[in-house]
């Protein structure tokens, strides 16, 4: 059985987005548009990240789909908010919450490379046969195809 020499560092989108945050932070909340059939209007995919003493970033709990208000009620302060889901929210910049400028809400190739390199240096590889792409929502093209073909 042939084993490929390829090693993969899977980069979660929230980690790639957090690289865009210039401010000194302890917790970052990344909000992404949920857009999943059956999700209540006004919900977002939220992931809370924490900065470790060594400068690395990890998830602080499991990401979830909820209202921004519900996520903010549970997340610690001070808190920096980023991600394209912030566009759908009326987030107050009070009570220890700071919202990042919109031009920093999306992942960049540099951010993916930075996080991937950090994961690779730490030996954070995912075996090729265990790699799974996970989405907060099903791809738009799949949903549209199913909608168009469900009545046929």
Image (cartoon, grey):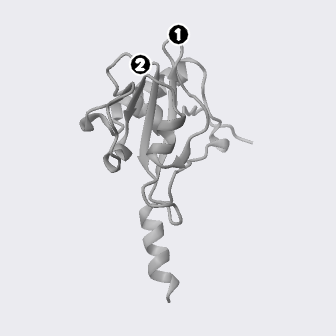
Q: Please state which of the two labelled residues, at mark 1 or mark 2, is closer to the viewer.
A: 2
**Residue 28 placed where, x, y %?**
44, 28
Q: Residues within 10 Å of mark 1 (few under 14, many from 20)?
A: few
Pointer 2: what residue? Answer: 25
Question: What residue lies at 53% left-to-right and 10% top-to-bottom?
Answer: 53
**Residue 91 placed where, x, y %?**
34, 40
Please report whichever mark, 1 or 2, sits nearer to the chain's N-terminal start.
2
Image height check: is 21 above or below 88? above
Q: Tell me the quarter of the picture where residue 78 sits.
A: top left
Is the N terminus in the top left, top right, bottom left or bottom right quadrant? Answer: top right
The dot on residue 54 is 1
**Residue 47 placed where, x, y %?**
51, 37
Q: Is there any visible trace of residue 124 in the rendered image? A: yes
**Considering the numbered disc 1 on the image, is that residue within a helix, a strand or a loop?**
loop
Q: Is there any visible trace of residue 11 in the rendered image? A: no
**Residue 37 placed where, x, y %?**
50, 66
Q: Nearer the viewer, residue 126 or 51?
A: 51
**Considering the numbered disc 2 on the image, is that residue within a helix, a strand or a loop?**
loop
Image height check: is 4 above or below 33? above
Image height check: is 82 above or below 56? below
Question: What residue lies at 60% left-to-right and 29% top-to-bottom?
Answer: 125
């Amino acid at each position: 059985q042939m084993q490929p020499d390829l090693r993969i560092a899977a980069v979660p989108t929230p980690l790639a987005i957090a690289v865009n945050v210039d401010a000194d932070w302890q917790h970052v909340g990344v909000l992404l548009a949920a857009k999943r059939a059956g999700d209540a209007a006004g919900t977002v995919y939220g992931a809370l990240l924490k900065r470790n003493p060594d400068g690395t970033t990890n998830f602080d709990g499991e990401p979830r789909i909820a209202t921004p208000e519900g996520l903010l009620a549970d997340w610690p302060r001070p808190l920096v908010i980023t991600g394209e889901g912030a566009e759908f929210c009326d987030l107050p910049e009070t009570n220890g919450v700071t919202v990042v400028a919109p031009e920093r809400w999306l992942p960049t190739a540099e951010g993916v490379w930075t996080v991937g390199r950090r994961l690779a240096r730490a030996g954070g590889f995912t075996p090729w046969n265990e790699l799974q792409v996970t989405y907060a929502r099903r791809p738009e093209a799949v949903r549209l195809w199913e909608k168009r073909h469900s009545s046929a």
